[in-house]
Image (cartoon, coloured by chain):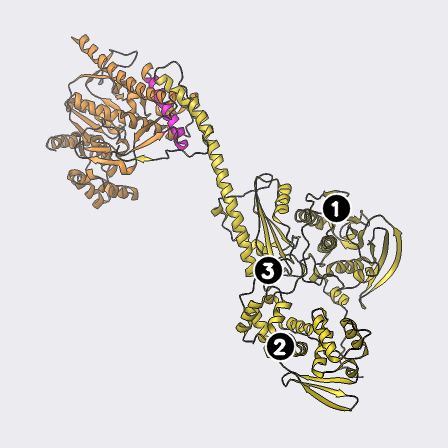
Chain colours: A orange, B yellow
Amino acid sequence: MKTSKSKERSKKAEEKQKNILEMLKSHGAKVYDDLDNGRFPKFSIPSRSVSNIVYDKQLRQYILGSNSALRSAKNSAQLRSFTQLMWLAFFANRLTQEKKSSTLRDVYYSSQAFAVEFEDQSESDNIIVDLEAVTSKPREDFHIYPEERSSIFGDLNIEYTIPGYEGKTMNLSNHPDGYSIGPSLTTAELVDTSAEIVIAIEKGGLFTRFVEEQIDKKFKSIIINTGGQAPRSTRTLLKRLHDEMRLPVIVLTDGDVYGEHIAMVIKSGSANAAHLRELTVPDAKWVGVWATDIEKYKLPTIPMTESDIKRCYDLQKDPRYESGIWKKELDVFLRLKRKAELEAFSKYGLTNITDKYLPQKLELAKSL
Amino acid sequence: MSSIKEQFNQISPSEFFYSNRDLAGFSNPTRSLYTAVREFVENALDACDQKGILPDVHLIIKAVDPEKPDPKPYILTVKDNGPGIDADHVPLAFGTVLYGSKFGLKQARGMFGLGATMAILYGQITTNKPVTVKSSVDGKIQDQFEVLLDIQKNKPVIVKHTTKEVSKKGLSISICLEGDYSKAGNKIRDYVYETSLITPYASITFDDPKGEKFSHPRFVKDIPPPPTIIRPHPHGIDVERIRRMIVESQFEIPNIDDAMIEKVRKDLGLSKKSLSFTAIMEKAKKKWKNLPRQVRVVISLMSFLKMDFEKLNKIKIEDIDVPNKKLFYWDFGDSQSKSVEMDPESLYYKQLTNTVQGEPLTTFLTKRFQRIGPNTAVKFAEFAGFKPEKRIGTLTNQELVNLSDSLQKFDDFMAPDSSCLAPLGEEPLEKGIKKFFNPDFTAVVQRPASAYSGFPFIIEMGIAYGGEIKSGGPHVYRYANRIPLLYDEGSDVVLKVVNETDWGRYKIKGEPPFIIVSHICSTRIPYKTAGKENVADRPEIERELRLALQFLSRKLASYMSKRGQAEMAKKRSNLYAKYIPMIAEFCTELAGKKKEPNYKKILDEETAIESKKPEEEENQIENQ
């Protein structure tokens, strides 16, 4: 029974990879044909300019509009970036075929072996986003990952699909420091879990406390440390936990405008990744720390900086902050002009947050 | 003896310049050496130009004692192959201030030959040595003079005069003067170099005191047409000048003596015959056109007196009363004054009034000025409020002033005749610029003649870019009447015009390798100072300079944009050559092919149509 399921899973993973390779091949073939027939190759890239990023109410995330730009090898101003993109596709093709992964920084350095010049890593990062936009696939599908890692802990069985580990399983509550969320974890099959909820928490310090306090057992939860703004791999995993394991997701952040937005990005994506659609958990819930909690729990606060306040005004223009709890809390932040960190609860004892605050919020989440 | 009595002394021009020598550019040993070089070289070139001789000018500067530190005495020698100066004139020409041959109205480098004498004077007062002049006008005999200048008397003192046989015409002048070559050397070398650019038909060599030889052989074989001497333009005139012209145009009634009667007889071809009055008149009528003015006047008088030559001998004309049409004369025979009526319709009456009252205004204008025809003269008379037939001899002082003012103000005169100007010409100028700077781009223009205050001028300008020109431009080379202007450029009108130009508009940016050659030709260059180094900003000159510069700048701009396009095309084709093979390599593996696509077609095609613009530029396709 288990073996057939496992086979099915690896078949699924293989299929996904096959699709990616097919797609890259078809792009390559088109360029090949153009060159062979004496034409300058070109393709269109969805425009990622601000004017082309719109909020889709149905998808509940930012998406790219219908504008697209033509990138042509004939245009000498675009020739360089055209070549860079072709190289990246070529490189992604190798990575996918050889089942190797690469960080963003690896990509930047690898280019030099092919005499493809990138001024700096931000230029190569940008081309990677171009490839995502052209193919509508996240870079992780091409085995390209960012350096930043977040971590996960809880009763979840997974089965690796990456080369050398195919079929190997792992329970993610075996190691108290948690497991770092990298390519092998993101691509692993999610087998089963006893957990009933996913708690995403902004900070490593609190993640450690939650593990120590056995929140995973007490509240039947999987704990994820987002390490600030959640990386894409983490958001992918959150989405899979929600979609495949049917687990609700709650988000716990610092009590400030950035925290509020970390939750929002998990829920409905960022403008930066408007060209991608598989990264959001529209049902995710932000449970705290709210601005109203600051007063309610009499938390010690620090004053907002000017950039905090500016960020508040910026977010007021975002359609997602036009209603509900998002608008309400933002308004209170602006009124208070003060903020509180998750650690603020330590004023009332180190376990105050896990003993008092968390249970109340979990209860509240059910009604949100 | 009263101590209050003031003493008035007349000073000679020599003394005046001696005490004001910095006016003429002899303020210190550096400047003086440079100015002396200029004056002698320019005189040599002017002398050759006037006779249409291709100039060979040889400049030598030698230190009397090379070991001494500067400033020290130098011997400056300038030799030319010009017409030379008659032995009779040499002492006066080089030993007197304000003696010269350049007083006519035409373009020349120097105005009065003053500068050379100033150099000689300066040499004499700093070293007490005479000037040595060697001149041969026939190419056979050379007169050699050593002359000192008597400053108080403004007179030459001949120290030595010898002659010898030679084989070449020309003048050589040599002075000893205190100078500072270590400081003046740069300017002198620049001067010689820049002079040879604007005088491409001259060969100029320079032996400097350090033993270096600078040779600038001619590279143009044709000498530009020499300027002609012309009548003045009405705009360039003042009251005093008109008064003098009127005096010149009037004639006195000739004294009818035996000699005059003899001349009339001869001109009528009647030397021996004795004809009656009627026969004389008929003869005169036939020959009228060929008769000189004086003879015509005598005949006219005879016509009213109705006398033959014998009777005429016995009277004396007393007065010609034009308004009352009466002719008064003294009859020696009767010893009394008599008068006859004059018929105003008669041709002879007109002749007499012309003589007495001068020409009618319109005739005066058309005959004595350039650019005034009969129609313009009549229009002008109306403008100035004169009757066209107004006799210029009858103008009052007030009317003279009015005439002078009106001549200045009347706008319908044609621009001054520029035949008195000798611009270099576009072709030699371009040739010179190309030879001197070896640029990538050259453009020259000669503007049509224009005038300021009645003095005609022509602007010639050249512009060059790239090649061997050093960056940091525009470097401006200023010339006036074929003289390079090297000092005081800051306050010059050419610099002003150049500096006010927005070069960015002409696609010229940064520190461009870029030169401008500007040549102003005029019968009178409006120098700001006597040192002849910078030109004042007369609006007319400024305007012409601006137009010339704009014209050339536009040409340069179109060259620059072509150059830019060519560079772009080259850059683009380099980009293709670099990147297309890479794209081919990557897509071959991507597409899972073995053989690379044949992309050569694209590259070949692109090189062939380099200049064509790419069809697709950064275009956004809406709503795809």
Q: Have a look at marks 1 and 2 and say if they share a chain.
A: yes
Is A108 left or right of B512, judged from the image as shown? Answer: left
Instruction: Of the two numbered discs 3 and 2 on the same chain, state the one appearing first in sequence.
Output: 2
Q: Which residue is pictured at 61% across the width and 45% down the height?
A: B430
Which residue in the structure is indicated by mark 3? B536
Q: Have a look at marks 3 and 2 and say if they share a chain.
A: yes
Which quarter of the rendering shows the C terminus of chain A?
top left
Q: CA distance from mark 1 to mark 3?
A: 31 Å
Residue B391 in the image, given as x and y percentages of width and height: 62, 77
Question: At numbered mark 2, what does the secondary structure look like: helix, strand or loop?
Answer: loop
- Which residue type does callout 2 highlight? Arg
- Which residue type does callout 1 highlight? Phe
The label nearer to you, 3 versus 2, is 2
Q: Is residue A73 magenta?
A: yes
Instruction: Of the two numbered discs 1 and 3 on the same chain, state the one appearing first in sequence.
Output: 1
Q: Decide: marks 1, 2 in contact (CB < 8 A)? A: no
Which residue in the structure is indicated by mark 1? B206
Q: CA distance from mark 3 to mark 2?
A: 39 Å
| Vertical comparison of B432 with B489: above or below | above
Pointer 3 local density, CA inside 10 Å: few below 14, some 14–19, many at least 20: some
Instruction: Of the two numbered discs 1 and 2 on the same chain, state the one appearing first in sequence.
Output: 1
Region rendered in magenta: A72-95
Q: Is residue A329 magenta?
A: no
Question: At numbered mark 3, what does the secondary structure look like: helix, strand or loop?
Answer: loop
Is B184 left or right of B87, judged from the image as shown? Answer: left
Is A239 left or right of B96, judged from the image as shown? Answer: left
